Image (tube, rainbow, N blue to C red):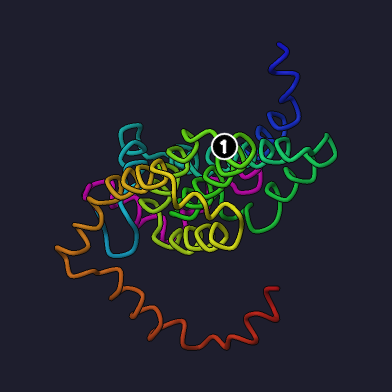
Amino acid sequence: MDVVFKYRIPLLLAIVKFLLPFFLQHNAYELQRDEYLYLQQGHHLAWGYMEVPPLLSVFAWISQLFGQSFFMVKLWPSLFGACTLFVACLMTMEMGGKQFALFITGLSIIAGAYLRVNFLFQANFLEVFFWTLSAYYLILFIKTHAPHYLYWIAVSLALGFMSKHSVVFFMLGIFVAILATPFRKLLLFRQFYVAACIALLLVLPNLLWQYDHHFPVVHHMKELRETQLYILVRLLFCSTNC
């Protein structure tokens, strides 16, 4: 009971986060078109696809086992959204945040862009969760210097990579931050390289699949740039989204 009381605010906010999307969209509306694509991947499990890495297809496969109902499709983004909120609140607690700070943390994930991210069956909800989880373990490592947190960071980032390749930008950000701070001494620790090897082993099946298929992710990004992204003006995009 003490544990439940300690985490009562994150738990309540996570429950709201999980349930809210189901009240905002009636199942009479069809799935978004990309969701149909990712659900079909569950019929053809592989170590990679042109658009995304393989992890999302595993959840598509599980949904199919249970009938692929509207609820079973939307369950995963809503569930991982709730978990993302809970982990974010844990980060706030580790950095000294009290009840009001926890409420603001939860509110920022309940509302805004995350409301859409955590209701569409797309790779984004997995990517956001795993990079949030890796950030949480990074905070724990900074506070405790316990090397086992490096391994959890590696696993989280690897699962993020197996969800969506764009998590690489988050990984690069962490690496640059390490180089720019006194934590650059991590590069002298054996555990850092063991963790890096663990991450590499976890993502290796997808890397080999990409190599064997001539890196279709590169072709996909090139196709997006030539058919859709070319119409975006960087300055206008920044001014309307910042």
Residue displayed at 70% across by 81% down: 239
Image x and y of residue 102, in percent:
77, 39
Image x and y of residue 77, in percent:
51, 45
Region in magenta: 20-47
Q: Is the residue 202 above or below the residue 36 in the image?
A: above
Corner quadrant of residue 167: bottom left
Corner quadrant of residue 66: top left
Furthest residue toward top: 1
Residue displayed at 47% across by 43% down: 153
Q: Is residue 181 left or right of residue 202?
A: right
Query: The residue tagged with tag 1: helix, strand or loop?
Result: loop
Q: Nearer the viewer, residue 162 or 12?
A: 162
Figure quadrant of the C terminus = bottom right
Identity, as a three-letter code, of the amino acid under mark 1: His
Residue displayed at 60% across by 49% down: 25
Q: Is the residue 140 above or below the residue 132 in the image?
A: above
Membership of 158 in magenta stretch: no
Q: Is residue 211 left or right of residue 52?
A: left
Q: Is residue 73 left or right of residue 198?
A: right
Image x and y of residue 115, in percent:
63, 52
Furthest residue toward right: 100
Furthest residue toward left: 212
Image x and y of residue 96, in percent:
78, 37
Figure quadrant of the N terminus = top right
Q: Is the residue 79 above or below the residue 188 in the image?
A: above
Which residue matches tag 1? 145
Membership of 36 in magenta stretch: yes
